[in-house]
Image (cartoon, rainbow, N blue to C red):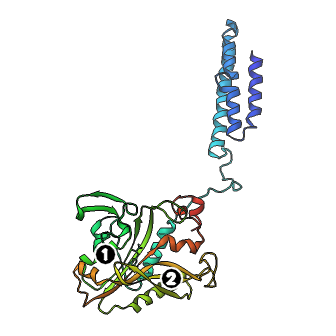
Amino acid sequence: MLEKIENIKSEANLESGLIKDEKTLEEFRLKYLSRNGLLNTLFEEFKSVDRESKGKVGKSLNELKISLQKIYDEQKEKTVSGKSPDNESPDITLPGVKFNKGTKHLISQAIDEITEIFQRIGFQVYEGFEIEDEYHNFDALNTPDYHPSRDMQDTFYLHSEGKDKNYLLRTHTSPAQIRVMEKTKPPVRVIVPGKVYRNEAVSSRSLAFFHQIEGLYVDRKVSFSDLKGTLDYFAKEFFGENLKTRLRPSFFPFTEPSAEMDVECYLCSAKGCRICKYTGWLEIGGCGMVNPDVFKMVGYDPDEYTGFAFGMGIERTLMPKYGIPDIRLFYENDIRFLKQF
Ligand code: DAH
């Protein structure tokens, strides 16, 4: 038995040199130290050793136990912490530890950039409410009762306590115009970024929520050319090139006259490409001169003040800029998508 113990001891010493990772360490433990390992088998055999030899064999067996445990502990320290007890200096050939630095979401970056562009020309930032009442979302914006956008198919209603207290998820950032004008006297220059909700079928072009940026400028003698000048300034700053902008006649109940805002396609320099559908223009939102009826609702005198307003879709503006083919990509939080921005 003593000879057997000695053999196992030298075998274990030899094998300790082969331990190089957690797998080989575990193999060592299973072979020698586990319940069915060699050490326990020896202790079983020890029971039948005759009385005279018990002292000697027992001593040697205990020494084996201690030395096996020592080998295991040392090797574990080495493999798990990656440190070698006899060589404390770091192994510079090991691959580095990757540090994943988080960044702002693409949409937040765009909101920061756009608001900063407008802040430079004196606009203030206001956030508005995502839960609005029907009055601010529709009535005060001159939207008639029969307007289809009020339909349940288009708007998410939350709960109703009569006409004045009909709560909903705002369908656009425009009610923030009303909130600001109710609280401030002209001149007003605000920009309102935020999330809006619409009861739409989900597809690559539409989701039940997206982001808009609203703008409102009210003062004496604000004219349509101020609107055009502001849009030109924005397009130059945001798209970074000397691109033309154009306004196309349109209709919104809260502006009169109303227009759609287009920017020359910066992807093909207005030559015509797949993204701009070969028109040379990209649509970025709606705008117009604030309807005098809206001013009356908030107690502004329409004979004294005029103003312009606009609302841009953020996803819609970013998709062509970065060639993003599907609006759902913004919200899937796939790190492979997000880390590109
Ligand atoms: N609220 C409109 C929409 O969601 C966009 C819009 C158009 C905003 C004209 C405006 C505006 O402020 O003047 O489609």
Give the camera-side residue of 67 and 183: 183
The answer to whether residue 268 is left or right of residue 333 is right
The label on residue 50 is none
At label 2, counting other C-alpha atoms closer than 10 Å, the crowd grade (few under 14, some 14-19, many 20 or more) is many
User: Percent from the top left, x then y, of residue 254?
Assistant: 34, 78
At label 1, counting other C-alpha atoms closer than 10 Å, the crowd grade (few under 14, some 14-19, many 20 or more) is many
Asked which secondary structure carries label 2, the reply is strand
User: Percent from the top left, x then y, of residue 190?
Assistant: 35, 79
Quarter of the image that includes the C terminus: bottom right
Q: As displayed, is residue 187 above or below residue 15?
A: below
Mark 1: C-beta under 8 Å from nearest atom of ligand 1: yes
Residue type indicated by callout 1:
Leu
Give the camera-side residue of 321 and 203: 203
Quarter of the image that includes the N terminus: top right
Q: On the rendering, which quadrant does ligand 1 occupy?
A: bottom left
The answer to which image quadrant residue 194 occupies is: bottom left
Residue at image mark 2: 262
Name which of mark 2 and mark 1 comes first in the sequence.
Answer: 1
The label on residue 141 is 1
The answer to which image quadrant residue 231 occupies is: bottom left
Residue type indicated by callout 2:
Asp
